[in-house]
Every structure is written in structure tokens, then in C-alpha cells.
Amino acid sequence: MTDIKNDKANGYNLLYINTFTDGFGFALGVDLDAEYPFSIWQFSEQDDKRIFYNGIFYPIDKYEEAYSEFHLRIKKYRTDNPNTGDGYAYLASTELTRLAKLSKESEDNIPIKSRWFKK
């Protein structure tokens, strides 16, 4: 369990969070020191805590795939749960700025997206 004010999931800094009114949500995270630096998590919020599960991890060159899968999970959850509304969405601009700077300095040139999922 992670405190709801904590912007991390199992050591990964959360870049994007999307929640639903039923307390479930999805997160996209990064840990550039990890073997697989990008991760997607499903989570539930209970008593001001987040419980993360169903993590999928991606290598440095698969950011686009991770980003797409994150949004596909959100879309599927909306489709499978039509009576559940959107909660809140969170974009970690500080972490994205840091990644963008690193991508300019890196041979890997991590693609950073500035768009957000449109309903």
C-alpha cells in the first residue's frame, strides 16, 4: 500500500494517473535506474491509500508502447464499466520535464508526449 499523496508505485515515479469514481485507476511510471524503466499499474484507492497491482514493465526503447497500453487500459475500463465516471487525472509535469531533458542528452532519445487522453 502507498499513501495517496505519494507519487510513486513500487519505486517508480508516476508520470500519469487516471482514476474512476469507483476508486479504481491506472498509472504510468518511470524509474530510469530499473532494468525496465517504464511501468503501467492498475490500482485501487481505499482509506487514502493506493494498492498497486497488475504491473507491466517496458524497456527504455518501448515508451510509446507503454504509453499506448496505458490509454488502452483506461479505454477498456470505461467500456467495461459504463456506469463508472471519471475521477481525476494527474500529470507529473516535473517528472516529464526531467525525462525530456534526459532524452535530449541520451542516445536513446526517449520520446516524451505532451498530449493527454481525450474521452
Image (spheres, grey):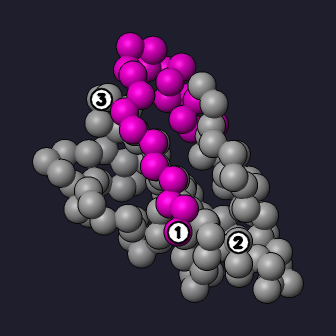
Task: Give the numbered dot on residue 22.
Answer: 3
Q: Earlier in the sequence, mark 2 or mark 1?
A: 1
Q: Which of marks 1 and 3 is nearer the N terminus?
A: 3
Please name the amino acid that badge 1 sits on: Thr
Most foreground residue, 29 or 112: 112
Please name the amino acid that badge 2 sits on: Ala
Is 92 included in the stretch rendered in magenta? Answer: yes
Position above or below: 80 against 34:
above
* Mark 3, secondary structure of its residue: loop
- Determine the CA span between mark 2 and mark 1: 10 Å
Please name the amino acid that badge 3 sits on: Asp
* Stretch of the chain drawn in magenta: 72-94
Task: Give the numbered dot on residue 100.
Answer: 2
Residue 81 showing in the rendered view: yes
Is 89 included in the stretch rendered in magenta? Answer: yes
Identify the image quadrant of residue 75. Answer: top right
Which residue does the numbered mark 1 point to in the structure image? 94
| Rendered location of residue 94, percent (x, y) | 52, 69
CA neighbours of label 3 inside 10 A, class few (<14), some (14 to 19), many (20+): some
Residue drawn at (39%, 38%) of the image: 88
Mark 1 or mark 3, whichever is nearer to me: 1
